[in-house]
Amino acid sequence: MKGTCVFLLALAIAAEGCAMHINKRVVAVSAITIGSAIVAAKADQDCRINVGVGPCYGHYGPAKAIEGLRIGEAGFSVLMGLWWKKEYGKGWWAFPAGITALNSVDAAIAWHKHCRPGTHLDMHDPFGSRYCE
């Protein structure tokens, strides 16, 4: 979470150059986009706890790297939206809205994954891979 706060601070500093283009709508869309990335990261963390690593987003990749990329992608889309608003004015929200939709779908999928009926999560797998059996 500390890394997320540092990232958001860097994002705010980078956006300062576009300050004349920031209004309430821009702040709301940016907050929703970054928030969706954080919610998707939490959903993926819950998925990895509930059904193991394999069936979840990113599969066996390191969770911190995957979620760092997800939050970085959201921040980049916000910066692209700000740049688009500065250069062209209209349609700036398309970049952040697309990433928000992607994160929302990923979160919904992750929170709906469970072990099949009659199985349970093997917490004592000698190889540490944790899977439903």
Image: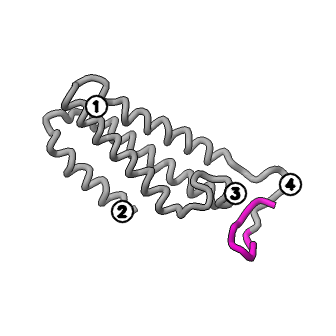
Q: Amino acid at mark 3?
A: Val
Dot 1 falls on a residue whose secondary structure is helix
CA distance for labels 3 and 1: 38 Å
Query: Hey, which quadrant is residue 32 in on the image?
Result: top left
Q: Earlier in the sequence, mark 4 or mark 1?
A: 1
Q: Label 1 near label 3: C-beta < 8 Å?
A: no
| Mark 2 vs mark 1: in front | 2
**Within-10-Å neighbours for mark 3: few <14, some 14–19, many 20+:** many
Q: Amino acid at mark 4?
A: Gly
Judge the density around disc 4: few (<14), some (14-19), many (≥20) Cα neighbours within 10 Å.
few
Mark 3 or mark 1: name the one nearer the start of the chain: 1
Asked if marks 3 and 2 touch (Cβ < 8 Å), the reply is no
| Tag 3 residue | 51
Q: Which residue is mark 4?
A: 118
Q: Which mark is residue 3?
A: 2
In which quadrant of the rendered image does the N terminus lie? bottom left
Q: How is the image coloured?
A: one colour
**Residue at 23% over, 49% down:** 12
Task: Give SS at disc 3.
Answer: helix
Marks 3 and 2, the one that precedes in the sequence: 2
Query: In the image, what residue type sits under mark 1?
Result: Arg
| Residue 25's disc number | 1
Callout 2: helix, strand or loop? helix
Q: Is residue 28 above or below residue 45?
A: above
